[in-house]
Amino acid sequence: MARKVGVRWLREPEKHDYPAAKSYLRLLYDERTAAGHVDRLERTRMSKFKAKDIFRASRLSLLGISNYHVKKDRRKIKAGESLSPLLLIRDDNNAKVVIADGYHRLCAVYSFDEDAVIPCKIA
């Protein structure tokens, strides 16, 4: 594990994160369900969870620091740039969390500190 680095976050997800989340969610759900999830994300308040807990709940594997997008986000972190919070969906049918937007950011942050508290919206 690399040395801990302070991660800066924007107060709210960036506007372009919502269409990106919808694009991904349309692969998992029909158009109406995906749109409903995104609508709820836009209206919900910010939450915070530890990086390691988001990974456990998502059941996804950690991408390595050699991944292009993870490298890019790691550079942003080192440069002190603010990252956009994650967008998460609770998949109650499968008892897991779907990372609708922010998977690469999560991997980048985790590479510095698995206990980092990550701001997100969860619906």
Image (cartoon, grey):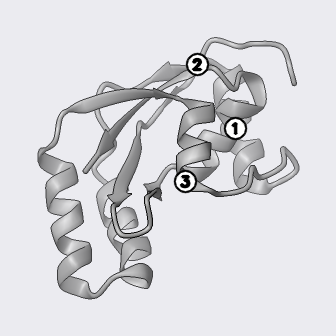
Query: Where residue 67 sits in the image (x, y, percent)?
Result: 81, 55
Estimate the spatial distance between the alpha carbons at disc 1 and disc 3, rounded to whole Å. Answer: 16 Å
Decide if residue 16 is on the left or right side of residue 103: left
Q: Which numbered disc covers residue 121?
A: none
The quarter of the picture where the N terminus appears is: top right
**N-term mark: 1 or 2:** 2
Q: Nearer the viewer, mark 2 or mark 3?
A: 3
Q: Is residue 56 above or below residue 94?
A: above
Q: Nearer the viewer, mark 1 or mark 3?
A: 3
**N-term mark: 2 or 3:** 2
Secondary structure at numbered mark 1: helix
What is the crowding at mark 2: few (fewer than 14 residues within 10 Å), some, or many (at least 20)? many
Residue that carries the numbered disc 1 in the rendered image: 108
Estimate the spatial distance between the alpha carbons at disc 1 and disc 2, rounded to whole Å. Answer: 10 Å
**Residue kind at label 1, given as amino acid type:** Ala
The quarter of the displayed image where residue 79 is located: top right
Query: Where residue 49 sits in the image (x, y, percent)?
Result: 45, 28
Residue that carries the numbered disc 2 in the rendered image: 7
The quarter of the displayed image where residue 71 is located: top right
Q: Is residue 41 above or below residue 98?
A: above
Query: Where residue 50 sits in the image (x, y, percent)?
Result: 53, 26
What is the crowding at mark 1: few (fewer than 14 residues within 10 Å), some, or many (at least 20)? many
Decide if residue 111 is on the left or right side of residue 118: right
